[in-house]
Amino acid sequence: MIRLACLLGLVALATVVRLALRTDGAGAILFSFVGFPALAGALAIYAVARWRAGALRGNGGVQLRLGKEKP
């Protein structure tokens, strides 16, 4: 899943580079309908993959509980 997220991120990056090099309406439409959805999909897939891998669990990490610290 991470590789798919990277691929979608590269697609989004390619559309941004194309938009930066040729600032015309076609580049803007390409980024709007291909690049931005690819970027959103890449971020969503990456977040789900990291969540499934256990990166967002609080197991042993530093947790701050305001007002409930023990000396």
Image (spheres, grey):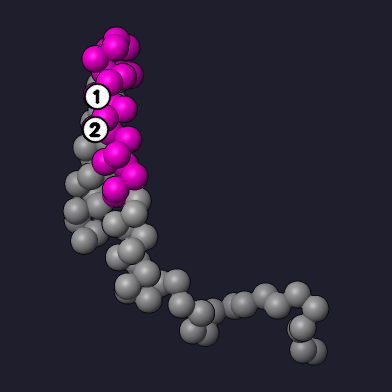
> If the image is split into quadrants, where does the N terminus sit?
bottom left
Q: Position of residue 63 (x, y in %)?
A: 62, 77
Question: CA separation, marks 2 and 1?
Answer: 6 Å
Residue bearing mark 2: 34
**Magenta span dominant secondary structure:** helix
Q: Quadrant of residue 47?
A: bottom left
- Residue at (70% x, 77% y) in the render: 65
- Residue at (27% x, 21% y) in the render: 29
Q: Position of residue 16 (x, y in %)?
A: 31, 27
Q: Secondary structure beneath disc 2?
A: helix
Q: Quadrant of residue 67?
A: bottom right
- Residue at (41% x, 72% y) in the render: 55
Instruction: Please tell me whether residue 35 is drawn above or below residue 58 in the rendered image.
Output: above
Q: Position of residue 15 (x, y in %)?
A: 25, 28
Q: Which amino acid is tagged 2?
A: Val
Please provide the residue range marked out in magenta.
Answer: 20-42
Instruction: Please tell me whether residue 1 is drawn above or below residue 54 in the rendered image.
Output: above
Is residue 13 among what the camera can see?
Answer: no
Please tell me how crowded label 2 is: few (under 14), some (14-19), or many (20+) other residues with Cα within 10 Å.
some
Q: Quadrant of residue 40?
A: top left
Q: Secondary structure beneath disc 1?
A: helix
**So how many labels did they put on this image?**
2
Q: Mark 1 and mark 2 in contact (Cβ < 8 Å)? A: yes
Residue bearing mark 1: 30
Q: Position of residue 61 (x, y in %)?
A: 54, 79
Is residue 35 among what the camera can see?
Answer: yes
